[in-house]
Image: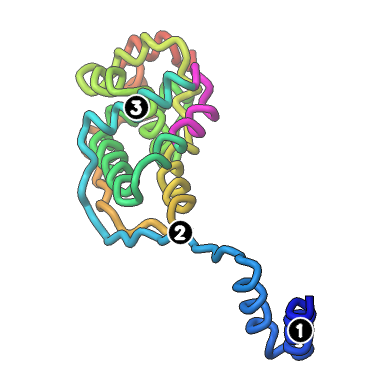
Amino acid sequence: MKNILLIIFVISSLGCTSNNKKETMGIFDKLFGKKEQKSEPKEPVQNSEKLMDSDSFWKIIATSKTKSSGDYEKQQLELEKELLKLTATEILEFDNKFRTLRGEVYNWDFWAAAYIINGGCSDDCFSDFRGWLIGQGKETFERSRQNIESLADLNETNGGDWEGLSYVPTDAYAKKTAGDMPNGIRENFEISGEEWDEEGDDLKNKFPQLWAKFGME
């Protein structure tokens, strides 16, 4: 009993000044067995242009789409959950693949499709459209690259407008590491193909099936 009272007295004496607070708490923790809390080590990630392999990428997209049942906001949440299962390096590789695919369809034909489906489409809108297209999954994406008119077969398009999907990898990386994503691949911003005139019949003649379903007439 005397030993306990002596310990309490010593701790109280040390705690009288602010300079001794940390020392006091250290003694207290050692005496009463408080466990030290270790922060989770952050994984260092270097700048990288490495791409996630296609099978893994599309599997993640497919899983998020299947679990969301057509709900775009839910698919974003499901995609983030899938990405948080990965390492920080793998999240960067996923984002590199996403940006690469988005850059591969940066051409006037796809912009025409986006314009028809959305009833008009700015440069920012076209970026969102290409993200939306990736979010539809591998089959839809690849079919449209072979034949853009295949997009007329879709029952629901949300106007081809999906801004939030493009930000999911960056948000997931921040949650994973509490830091900013390193520099990845340089996305293609050099548009290719033949430009069209939005004022005439170019769009209607270019993609008649899309125009019949989504056109502004």
Which picture quadrant has residue 30?
bottom right
What residue type is disc 3 on?
A: Ala
Q: In terms of secondary structure, where does tag 1 sit?
A: helix
Q: Earlier in the sequence, mark 2 or mark 3?
A: 2
| Closer to viewer: mark 1 or mark 3 | 1
What residue type is disc 2 on?
A: Glu
Q: Earlier in the sequence, mark 1 or mark 3?
A: 1
Task: Determine contact: label 1, label 3, CB under 8 Å.
Answer: no
Residue 114 locus on image (x, y percent): 39, 27
Give the residue at mark 1: 6
Give the residue at mark 3: 112
Q: What is the CA distance from the residue labelled 2 to the residue labelled 3? A: 48 Å
Q: Nearer the viewer, residue 187 or 88?
A: 88
73 in the magenta segment:
yes
Residue at left 23%, top 23%? 145
Name the magenta segment's main secondary structure. Answer: helix
In the rendered picture of this protein, how many numbered marks are placed on residues?
A: 3
Q: Is residue 153 left or right of residue 10?
A: left
Residue at left 48%, top 58%? 178
Q: What is the CA distance from the residue labelled 2 to the residue labelled 1? A: 38 Å
Label annotation for residue 113:
none
Q: Is residue 214 left or right of residue 73?
A: left
What residue type is disc 1 on?
A: Leu
Q: Nearer the viewer, residue 12 or 76?
A: 12
Q: Which residues are magenta?
A: 68-79
Q: Is residue 133 placed above or below 93 in the rendered structure?
A: above
Give the residue at mark 2: 40
Residue 86 locus on image (x, y percent): 35, 42
Residue 1 locus on image (x, y percent): 78, 75
Q: In terms of secondary structure, where does tag 3 sit?
A: helix
